[in-house]
Amino acid sequence: MTFENDWHPETKLVHGGTSRSQFGETSEAMYLTQGFVYETAEAAEARFKGDEDGYVYSRYGNPTVSMFQERMCLLEGAEDARATASGMAAVTAAIGCQVEHGDHIVAAHALFGSCRWVVEKLMPKYGVECTLVDGKNLNAWKAAVKPNTKVFFLESPTNPTLELVDIKAVADLAHENGAKLVVDNVFATPLYQHPLKLGADIVVYSATKHIDGQGRCLGGIILADKEWINENLHDYYRHTGPSLSPFNAWTLLKGLETLSVRVDRQTDTAEKIATALNGQKKVSKMIYPGLDSHAQFDLAQRQMRRGSTLLAFELAGGKQEAFEFINKLEVVSISNNLGDAKSLITHPATTTHKNLAKDERISVGITDGLVRLSVGLEAADDLIEDIDRALG
Ligand SMILES: *Cc1c(COP(=O)(O)O)cnc(C)c1O
């Protein structure tokens, strides 16, 4: 259905990829099945050979999972995709499927904790070395390239300090050196940043975050062109088994239907909170890509549509003041998750990033006073009042 490509994102989110059964159901059908049956032995043979289209086993593919993949492809402008059981399954497969012993990865050092573990700790066990660089510094990327560099990996905005990486510039550099660029686009969401259009080769998401957006299930997805998927991911995905469950795919399809309404509203509120707190006495630093006080505001304007739903700020009083503030919040809950309908706050230094050595942690901007706020769907005024009161 080529006309689907011409729809606006909101329409793609509601209708994209829907494949109705013979019953004509309104809502997408949930195919909770492991396997599929064949009319004849010949039909089974043809399907295994690839001469006939159709499903063979839900580890390889499933109709509900396919609907989720197609909807995401439309949204992202990608040719093909594979959905995974979690965001980390997506990251690990997207990187692991394209490297082999002797290859080299360059990654930005400000990464989601588990992503950093995959490139820094897991990959070297298989003989794949990794160099971590300051993602903001293009010269650092250049200097890190080696003849065996196969993959560049980054997230932008970064977790939790909301720094940006110039995706187009890094993509160009990757291509000049025969490497592929993988972008983890969770923070920007599929609505506000399109890494493939900026030159990235592969985009990954934790669908656990805004795509579900209601705190229910884990999921992930890898999107790229058909050729890359066929040559790199297709067999890896089938045989290592990171596949998404059809139940979770269905939940994520329902999440996508409301994605733009939720993310736009959450972003409106994030902007209001960022503006209200910018310059507040106890807040020594406010980081929000949608504010012109952001150190990379020009880049944000160029590669993101809006600042998105997360903000980070530093309390002048360090860990003690950060803890006191967090403990006093009544509407905002303490949780390391993000992208939820409920506003969630976390203290990265003692939770998500506690495994970083202190000097490394400080060098990526995760100070003792830094908190990260994921803005939910509550009334902006209630959130601002809650935060003001907790700041006391
Ligand atoms: C949450 C997250 C992940 C991991 O996703 P899971 O679904 O929790 O496995 C990866 N990258 C980023 C940027 C994330 O926020």
Image (tube, rainbow, N blue to C red):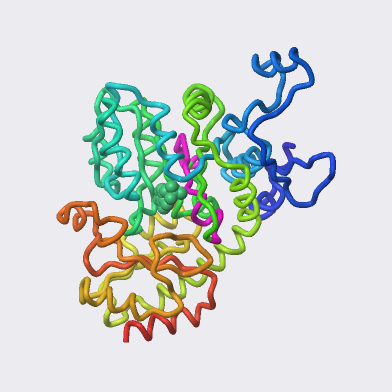
Residue appearing at x 79%, y 21% in the figure? 39
Residue appearing at x 46%, y 54% in the figure? 188
- Is residue 219 among what the camera can see? yes
Relative height, residue 176 to residue 253 (above, below):
above
Q: What range of the chain is rendered magenta?
A: 196-214
Relative height, residue 64 to residue 164 (above, below):
above
Relative height, residue 225 to residue 359 (above, below):
above
Residue appearing at x 28%, y 74% in the figure? 323
Q: Using residue 34 as the reference point, say whether residue 366 is left or right of it.
A: left
Residue appearing at x 30%, y 32% in the figure? 123
Quadrant of the frame with the N terminus: top right
Relative height, residue 286 to residue 259 (above, below):
below
Quadrant of the frame with the C terminus: bottom left
Seen from this angle, which residue lies furthest right? Answer: 23
Q: Using residue 266 as the reference point, say whether residue 131 is left or right of it.
A: left
User: Which percent across, then down, holds residue 107?
Assistant: 30, 40
